[in-house]
Image: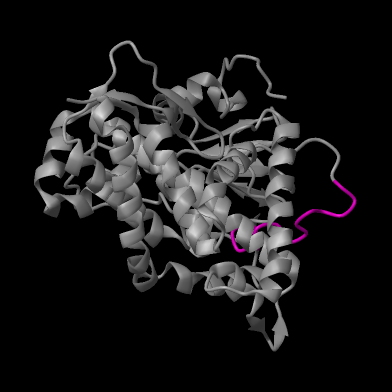
Amino acid sequence: MTDVRPVDEWATDFDVLSPAYVDDPFSIWDELRTSCPVAHTDRRGSTWLPTKYQDVVDLAHDIGNFSSLDITVIPFTGEEPEEPVLPYGVPPISADPPLHTFTRRLLLPWFSHTKVESYEAMTRELCAGLVDSFIADGRADAAADYAQQIPVRVIAAILGVPAELSDTFTGWVRAVLEFADDEEVRREGTLGLIEYFVAEVERRKEHPGDDLLSALLQTEVDGQPIEDSIVLGVAALTLIAGVDTTWSAIGSSLWHLATHPEHAKILATDPDAMPLAIEELLRAYSPVTMARIVTGEVEFQGCPMHAGDKVLMNFPGANRDPDAFERPDEVILDRAHNRHVAFGSGIHRCAGSNLARMELRVAIEEWLKRIPDFRIEEGAEVTWVGGQVRGPRSVPVVFP
């Protein structure tokens, strides 16, 4: 369960599940950059938290000292099963070369610019339909009613699974990523997801379709079919990585526009402003933090790290570093120089970044097309979750 002790010293006892960190990590990163740029904690094992852009990039590129074999920010502490459910994890994101190399190569065609363009009409129709379902009410939850409904249905289509299972998938993904303090919930979510895909793998062997899961089962590497456990891991990754991350980005962006009506007006009236704005919203509200495992004794920025330590790849914090971005805590919609790392850096940079950008852009476009003027409902509470993925879970808004 979560260590509920309050944090007295962020440099030596940080807690990414602390309500203070979830609600406002930005001021904590600002403090640490000047006092202790690489913080440490022993709350859930020895763990390090870099806060500067260049440090995060350097760590991401050093795959020799910092392995991706365990990317979980909050580790399981219970007994591991004798036979792991996913012996290869969820490659390519949880793999080092050579497994990382060929599994990433398998995914890239499904998320290329050209392929993503073929998903756009479906995504736009979905977004428009969601707006239709609540626009007459004059109020909605921009997170629960809209943002959280989009990526799961798009990913379901890519994997070739029924859209009516979207709510079930959402529950599994939340269990894996959000309930970091409840290992039983996390385990049940993981098993539910894997058991579903185990059955689907067997079904697709007999009845393949035009989808990612079927394609993986029909692909050979070095003349041999891919192991089922690798196919399962890639399918699980596609669902987990493609759902909560993107809906968090959409939800954060809509929260920003609800609280900055001048920005909503710009994007509603000037389509040419959208490309740079999308990159800026991704930078400012980067949702994902990953972990790396230290492979041996190494010193990084004066910090003595030991084999088995975890390093949290704080991409959101890197994107708020004043050494890398001018006025980093401001959202500047037309920011021209924007080398953000919202999608990571190095060999593990997100393979689905094209899809995520498209979904975020289309979601904002379709919302503003019908609801250009909206604000947070007076007296309503906006709630956020954090840990592996930070984003809003409730954004109650009203509109004319």
Q: Can you give x and y, in whole percent of width and height, for residue 161 in the image?
A: 57, 59
Indicate whether 282 appears above or below 15.
below
Q: Is residue 191 left or right of residue 385?
A: right
Question: What is the residue that sits farthest to the bottom in this orientation?
Answer: 223
Res. 52 visible in picture: no
Question: What is the residue that sits farthest to the top in this orientation?
Answer: 379
Report the magenta residues as a range. 81-95
Name the one closer to the observer, 95 or 255.
255
Indicate whether 49 appears above or below 224.
above
In which quarter of the view is residue 247 placed? Answer: top left
Question: Residue 88: within the magenta?
Answer: yes
Question: What is the residue that sits farthest to the left in this orientation?
Answer: 269
Magenta region, mostly helix, strand or loop?
Answer: loop
Indicate the quadrant containing the C terminus: top left, top right, bottom left or bottom right: top left
Q: Residue at x 73, y 60 (%)?
A: 199
Q: Can you give x and y, in whole percent of width and height, for residue 182 in the image?
A: 70, 29
Q: Residue at x 18, y 44 (%)?
A: 369
Q: Residue at x 43, y 32 (%)?
A: 144
Q: Is residue 120 left or right of residue 191?
A: left
